[in-house]
Image (cartoon, rainbow, N blue to C red):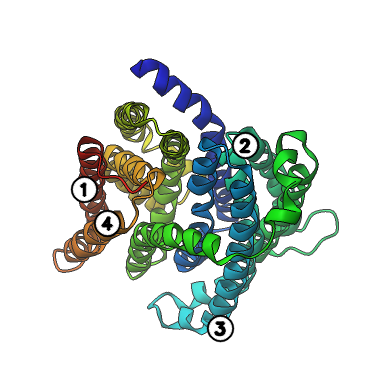
Amino acid sequence: MYWQEFRQTLRLSIPLIISNVAQVGLALIDSAMVGAIDYKQLAASSLVINAIGIPQVICMGLCIAITPLVSIARGRGDQLAASRYLYNGTVVATLGSILIALLCTLAMPLLDHLGQDPAIVAICKPYYLVMVWGLVPMTLFLSMKQFSDALEHTRTGMLLALLSLPLNAFLNWLLIFGHMGLPRLELFGAGIATALSRIIIVMLMAGILWRHRVYQSYIRLRRQAWHLRRPEIKELLHIGVPSGLQLVMEAGAFSISGIMVGWLGAEAQAAHQIALNCASTTFMAVLGLAMGASIRASHALGAGRPDQLKVIGKTTIMGGLLYGLATALLFVLLRQLLPLMFTTEPAVVESAATLLLVAALFQASDSLQCIGAGLCRGIKDVKIPTALVALAYWVIGIPVGYYLAFPLQWGAAGIWWGLVIGLSAAAILLNQRFLRLMKTAAMAI
C-alpha cells in the first residue's frame, strides 16, 4: 500500500518536477550566457534576482490557492466550484501582479541604497525593469497551470515549460550578443528574452485551456461560473495570503542573504549566485514532489479519505529525505565542476565550490521543509505553518547567518551556514505540525 501510494504521487509529480526544473533552467540559461560576457554582468543579474525575489514569490502566492481548492472541489465532484476558482483566482492573481510590478517600478531608486557596487547597480537597472513587468505574464501562466495541475493534467505545464527553454536560449542568443542584425544588449537583452518567452508561453497555455477536450467540461460552465464572487475570493485569499507569506519568508531569507553577500564584493556575489542557481535546481525538483503530494492530499481530503491522506504524507516525507541525501552527495562530488558552467574566473569558482559544500548540508532539510509546507497546504492548514516558517528563517536563520558572516568574519560561508540552520528548523517544525494533525485528526476540512 505504501509503495503504491508513493508511486502514484511520483507519477503525478514527475511532470511537475520537470516543469519546475525547466523554469530554473531559464535562470540558468540567462546566468550562463550573461556570465560568458564577464562576472560583473553575472553579479548584476544576481542583484536583480535577489531584489525581485520577494515580489516574484508574492505573485506565486497569489496563484497557489487555486490548486488545493480546485483539487478539493474535484474530489467532491463539484465542477462548477472548480471553474469558479479558476476564474476568480486568475483575475485576482493577475491584477495583483500588475500592482506589484507598478510598486516595484516606483521602488527602483532603492537599488542605489543597498550598499552594492555602483557599477553593478548601473548595469542592472534596465534588466530590473523588464524583469519586474515580466512578472505579469508569469503570474497569468501560473494561474492557469495551477488549475491544470489540480485536475492532475500536469503534462500540459511540463510541455510548455520545456518549450520555453530553447525559445529563451534562442532569444538570448539574439538579444544578449546581437546576432542576426539585432543590437547587442547584454544583460538587458536577457531580460527582454525572458519576458518575450513568458508572453508566448502564456498565450499557448490560454489556447490549450480554451480548446483542449480535457478542460471543456469546466470551460463550458463559464457563463455560470465566470463571475467575481466574494465567497471564492475570500477563500482564495484565506489560503493564498498565508501561503504567499510562507514563500516570502523563505525567498526573502535567500534574497536578504544575497544582498548581505553583495556587501562582500562582486566576486562573492557572483559565487553566491552560482551556488544558489545549483541549489535552486535541486529544490525545484523536490518542490514538484511536494506539489504532487499536496494535490493528492487535497483530493483525498475532498473525497473524505483520511487513511489515504496519512499514507500520502508519510511516504512523501520519506521520499523527500532520500532525495535530499542524494543531492547532498552530488554537490560534494561535483563542487569543483559545477561553477565552471557559469564562469572561469578562478576566485569565483573557488568561492562557489566552498558554498556548494555548505549547500550540501541543507539539501535534506530543504527537501523536508518544502514537503512539510506542501502537505499542510494540501489540507488547508496555512496560518500556523506561516508563523513556524517566520520563526525558522527570520528569528533563527538570518540573525545567525549575519553573526557568523560579519562579527565572526566567516564571510559568505557564514551566511550560508545561517541558511542551513534556518532550513533545518523549518523542516522539523513543519513536518511535526503535519504529523501531529494526522495523529489527532485536527484538520480544517
Whichever of callouts 1 and 2 sits on the residue coming sooner in the sequence is 2
The residue under label 1 is 429
The residue under label 2 is 158
Q: CA distance from mark 1 to mark 2?
A: 31 Å
The residue under label 3 is 106
On the image, the x and y values in percent for residue 11 come to: 51, 24
Q: Nearer the viewer, mark 1 or mark 2?
A: 1
Q: How many neighbours does mark 4 have within 10 angstroms: few (below 14), some (14-19), or many (20 or more)?
A: few
Quadrant, the N terminus: top left
Q: CA distance from mark 2 to mark 3?
A: 34 Å
Query: Which mark, by number, is residue 377?
Result: none
Whichever of callouts 1 and 3 sits on the residue coming sooner in the sequence is 3
- The one of 204 and 134 positioned closer to us in this rendering: 204
Q: Nearer the viewer, mark 1 or mark 4?
A: 4
Q: Judging from the image, what secondary structure is the residue with disc 4 in?
A: helix
Name the residue type under label 4. Ile
Name the residue type under label 1. Leu
